[in-house]
Image: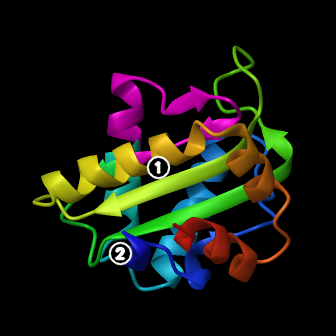
Amino acid sequence: MKELFQADTIAVGLKAKNKEQVIDEMVALLNCAGTLRDAAAYKEAIYAREELSSTGIGFGIAIPHAKSSAVREARVAVGISADGIDYSGGSMDKVRLVFMIAVQATDNDLHLRTLASLSRRLIDPVFRNHLAVCEDPKAVLQLLRAV
């Protein structure tokens, strides 16, 4: 899973204040890195997944994700917000860590393994706190790539 995380899809100073803004910001990260074939189609897939249930999972974390033919190569965009993002319309704590998983439509196994691996790591409050205070993408990569 280590190759899914790259510095060019990590933002340590998210500007977003709500779910729509953070989705825009994260999709832009993926698109600028060349990960997406069609940013608009991928964003549609993200919103279709959000319609099923919110990907705000608690503990200040959101994991928006979608499998789509609009994805050129699998990648996870990582966003950190110092101020927090109103991800669920005020019904939950603000989100500080966002992991947007982009995989091709046929990558069922990779999609599920990535979700499971991230979830296992993010259960640890020490790991979450270390991530939340990272000041640059290289520091985030070091944490995510540590065994």
**What is the secondary structure assignment of the residue under circle 1?**
helix
- Residue at image position (41%, 40%) is 47
Image x and y of residue 40, in percent: 39, 62
* Numbered tag placed on residue 118 in the rendering: 1
Callout 2: 10 Å neighbours few (<14), some, many (20+)?
A: many
Q: Give the magenta range.
A: 47-65
Image x and y of residue 85, in percent: 76, 39
Q: In what quadrant of the picture does the N terminus appear?
A: bottom left
Q: Is residue 6 above or below residue 147?
A: below
Q: Is residue 67 visible?
A: no
- Residue at image position (41%, 54%) is 43
How many tags in the picture?
2
- Is residue 64 in the magenta section? yes
Image x and y of residue 73, in percent: 28, 77
The image quadrant that residue 95 belongs to is top right
- Judge left or right: residue 46 versus residue 121: left
* Numbered tag placed on residue 109 in the rendering: none
- Judge left or right: residue 96 versus residue 56: right
- Judge left or right: residue 4 versus residue 62: left
Q: Amino acid at mark 2?
A: Leu
- Is residue 8 in the magenta section? no
Judge depth for marks 2 and 1 and give the one in front: 1
Q: Is residue 113 above or below residue 147?
A: above
- Residue at image position (33%, 37%) is 48
**What is the secondary structure assignment of the residue under circle 2?**
loop
- Residue at image position (48%, 73%) is 30
> Which residue is nearer to you in this view: 116 or 147?
147
Q: Amino acid at mark 1?
A: Leu
| Sequence order check, earlier mark of 2 and 1 | 2
Mark 2 sits on what residue? 36
Q: Is residue 143 above or below residue 63?
A: below
Give me the C-alpha separation between circle 2 and circle 1: 21 Å
